[in-house]
């Protein structure tokens, strides 16, 4: 809100979202807790850096599939475990 070049992005819906942030967070946690399973886990991308988030998400997805040239690519496809983690791990390290 302090930067006039970015202030235009903040709408009345965003303001209401800020007011309801705690409620949204509660229901998000409820949804993750009730739907996270070993067979189908929620994966959390935990970073504020959009570029890092996107690259680590892609790295995670690519690490889960076999495809031609994967082993020859010479690229480490193991995502950073401090960025890409299962929901329960991210919840344990959550600072309230």
Image: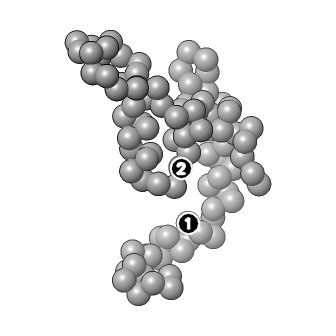
Q: Which residue is mark 2?
A: 47
Picture coordinates of residue 32, whole percent (x, y): 62, 36
State the residue lying farthest toward the left: 68
Q: At x 34% / y 26%, what residue is drawn?
A: 75
Left or right: 31, with 49 as reference point: right
Q: At x 38% / y 41%, what residue is drawn?
A: 55
Picture coordinates of residue 36, whole percent (x, y): 61, 27
Identify the secondary structure beneath mark 2. loop
Distance from Cα at disc 2 to Cα at disc 1: 20 Å
Picture coordinates of residue 56, whole percent (x, y): 43, 38
Label 1: how many residues lie within 10 Å, few (<14), some (14-19) or many (20+)? few
Quick one: 70 or 50, which is closer to the camera?
Answer: 70
Q: Which residue is mark 1?
A: 17
* Quarter assignment of residue 19: bottom right
Q: At x 49% / y 70%, what residue is drawn?
A: 14
Left or right: 21, with 65 as reference point: right
User: In this figure, which colouring scheme has been used for the structure?
Assistant: one colour
């Amino acid at each position: 809100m302090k930067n006039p070049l970015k202030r235009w992005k903040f709408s009345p819906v965003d303001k209401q979202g800020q007011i309801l942030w705690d409620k949204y967070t509660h229901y998000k946690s409820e949804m993750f807790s009730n739907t996270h399973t070993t067979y189908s886990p929620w994966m959390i991308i935990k970073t504020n850096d959009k570029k890092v988030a996107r690259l680590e998400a892609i790295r995670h997805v690519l690490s889960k599939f076999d495809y031609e040239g994967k082993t020859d690519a010479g690229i480490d496809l193991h995502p950073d475990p401090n960025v890409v983690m299962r929901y329960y791990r991210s919840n344990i390290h959550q600072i309230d």
